[in-house]
Image (cartoon, rainbow, N blue to C red):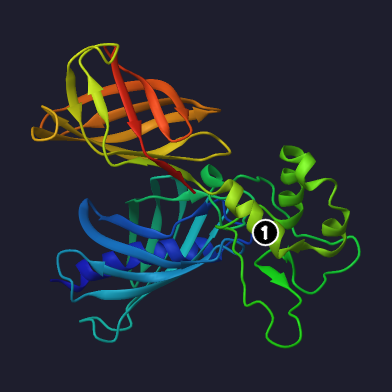
Amino acid sequence: MSNKTILLGVIAVTLLSTVGTAFAATPNWNITGTWNFDFNLGGSHYLHTMTVTNFDPITGAFSGTGVYVPDSSYTWKVTGVVSGDTISFTIVYDSTSPNPGYTVTGTGTITSATSMSGTATGPGQEFTWTATGTATQDFDHDGVANSQDLCPGTAKDVPTEKLNVNRWIWDGSNFVTNSPKGKGPQLSFSMDQTQGCSCTQILDWLHTNYPAQYGDMNGQYKFGCSISIMQDFIKLTSPKTFTAADSLYYNGPTDSAPLYGTGAFSFTWNPITGAVTGGYYNEIVPPVSGTTYDNIVSGGSVVGNAVSLTFTRTVPNNYAFSFTGTLTGNTLTGQLDGPYLFTATGAVTQ
């Protein structure tokens, strides 16, 4: 492999590092994960893979590793910064690589959640590059993607009086507390657990949605969120899952029709938004001992006790169908497309 080929790859990766360091704005994108790069030098294409393992949602600084796809002996380290929609980076090849110390810098623009592009330079070479992967947006920079953030616009908590012992606030980077003397409870909380909500946002949410149970909580606003408040909120907002070891699928709208299928069934939903986030239905036709059709719960909603679900499968055939019904206690009852009665008794866990 020519040095020209290796240089091109290095330059392309460096482009990403340089873009990040050139600006000081907060990042609009979190690029953690694997990105596939196509570096173009005079019409010749060179493929590299970059894996970002560390990303700071506040500063946009990131680091990771990379490799030249046709020859994995060429490995490198990358550092850079995401600022707004721009990215800058520097790539330095490893000491064990055939071209140790080779350095490339680059800049570019993140144009969507799955693509970015730009230019890069190395010793005596200039490149253009494109990259595909998966980036997430986090406008309030709390480390929780917009799509999963229950509380947009998160800011630092400021207790109206002071932060007390075993009370928790968000300081802009972490949940912090004043630890008690002695052992005390060894607890910690994260933004992932609170779905992007600070202490103040947690109190506001509980007061709005459970006023009779939590009241005005003036003491919590004054001194920070207590452990019980944090734990209650996390439990109330954690995903719920309905699981049944078996189900009954009738070949008609009532249970007077012949039993058509059985099988294990489960789905998970967000109790706040009602969005169904996944699940499965291992449909067995004929019942109990027939062929198993592995259906995926691909979407739906839970509003009160009303449930709507969509299913898809690709094996042994491509097929999609839906369900509408109710979840009362531990029993789900409703109609699959047809209509066909479907019912399952299991358990709801959180």
Residue 112 visible in the picture:
no
Q: Residue at x 21, y 54 (%)?
A: 45
Q: Which residue bears the numbered disc 1?
A: 230
Relative to residue 320, is residue 275 depicted above or below?
below
Residue 94 visible in the picture:
yes
Tell me the quadrant of the picture where the N terminus can be found.
Answer: bottom left
Q: Residue at x 67, y 59 (%)?
A: 230
Residue 31: x, y in percent?
A: 45, 57
Q: Residue at x 79, y 40 (%)?
A: 212
Q: Is residue 141 left or right of residue 39?
A: right
Secondary structure at numbered mark 1:
helix
Q: Is residue 121 left or right of residue 197?
A: left
Give the amino acid type for the residue marked by disc 1 in the picture: Met
- The residue furthest front is 256
Residue 201: x, y in percent?
A: 73, 49
Q: For mark 1, does the 10 Å Cα neighbourhood hold few (<14), some (14 to 19), or many (20 or more) residues?
A: some
Identify which residue, 50 or 1, lies in the foreground: 50
